[in-house]
Amino acid sequence: MGDLKFEEFGDIWIFLLTVPGLLLNMLVGLAQFICISLPLSVWAFAQWLGPTIIDIPVILFKTARILVNSGYGLLKGVFNFFLTFDWSWNALNDFPSLPSHIKALLNLGGINQPFDYFAGSYGTAVKEFILPLRRSMNDLRDFIDFMPWPVFFALVLLLVFWVSRKIGVVMLALGALFFIGIFGLMDLASQTFSLMILSIILCVAFGIPLGIFMSASDTVDRAVKPVLDIMQTMPSFVYLIPVLILFGVSPVAGLIAVVIYAMPPVVRLTNLGIRLVPFEVVEASHAFGANYLQRLFGTLIPLALPNVFAGINQTIMMALAMVVIAALVGAPGLGAEVLSAQGTVNLALGLQSGFAVALIAIVIDRSFHLYGERMQQHRKVGH
């Protein structure tokens, strides 16, 4: 898309002629993922699962041996500690830790070696599995790049107005677009848009069904919540390490990192929204003979939509907050520009790129907030 170039408006006809081809490429990539890559990945997983099940006794024996050795080393270290420790007051400043060889054994045998084995054995299959995502990101980025800026501006403004129904938010979005264009950040913004669109689609596609399962089963809820806690509280630099090992420095690595970081809000709020539906309403739908799917899609999800959209809004905000960190593993766009500005100590460039990300986040937040308020008012009047 480049900088603002008013003289290129005539290229809109070329753009309109190429839209069907670009859309076809995206549909073909999605079809390849669903019909080819996904079944092959499931088959490869099944092939891996069979020998693994057969090797379960060996795996359990090795695990037990590691645990026994670790337990023995721990007991030996504690025994030696009580025998040799200087029980003076000054010696109690430091808490006794595991011996170095025990920690090395745990780290090497319990974490590093198993993951290295998985990456070496199935890394190629994993890369083939996510290849359609890479193609979709490229096609979507090319689609946005080739779009004339007036058409892109018009589509964004129409979308903002449809979501918010407020002229003030539309003018804010227009100001954000002009700021991005005037400072020559359109190409980077298009890369950020493509990353955000795909990451939000993945978060919603996996997060909402997972939230529904959590709301339907307390067991699933108790099992998934600790995982969501880890996803939200684990420092992002930690899970960048396995992502980097599996996918290398690439846009897909950044996409996976963003999805891991941004998915929990939509899962949690979908679960919460469905659980907050009044019990009397659910009982009334059950009394009228509705089965679970009819209650889910006819009663629970419609009444939970404000919370669901709040979760989507928070997911989008967290995804935008992750773009700079994801740039460390190859995510393109405004985050990479902020990272470059930090490396060159260029305050002006950092402020421009960072302010562009902030403007995008503010427009999305205002739009979805107003959309959620409108949905709540729509529900209160009984429509």
Image (tube, rainbow, N blue to C red):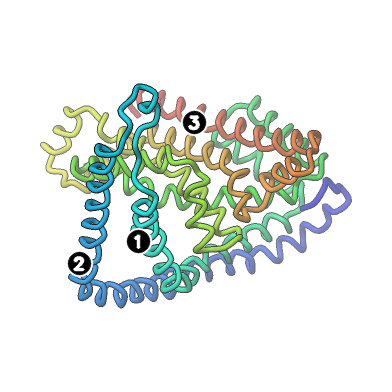
Mark 1 residue element? helix
**Pointer 1 residue:** 109
The numbered mark, 3 or 2, whose residue comes first in the sequence reads: 2
Along the line of sight, which residue is nearer the eye, 159 or 369?
Answer: 369
Q: Are marks 1 and 3 in contact (CB under 8 Å)?
A: no
The residue type indicated by label 1 comes to: Gly
Q: Residue at 83% of width from left, 56% of height from top? A: 10
In-image side of 21 versus 294 (left or right): right
Judged by depth in the image, the label closer to the viewer, 3 or 2, is: 2
Judged by depth in the image, the label closer to the viewer, 1 or 3, is: 1
Mark on residue 161? none
Q: Which x, y percent locates residue 108?
A: 39, 59
For the residues marked 3 and 2, what is the alpha-carbon distance in whole angstroms? 56 Å
Q: Which x, y percent locates residue 85?
A: 31, 35
Residue 303 can be seen in this image: no
The residue type indicated by label 3 comes to: Tyr
**Pointer 2 residue:** 61
Q: Residue at 46% of width from left, 25% of height from top? A: 373
The residue type indicated by label 2 comes to: Phe
**Pointer 3 residue:** 371
The numbered mark, 1 or 3, whose residue comes first in the sequence reads: 1
Along the line of sight, which residue is nearer the eye, 378 or 207?
Answer: 207
For the residues marked 1 and 3, what is the alpha-carbon distance in whole angstroms? 51 Å
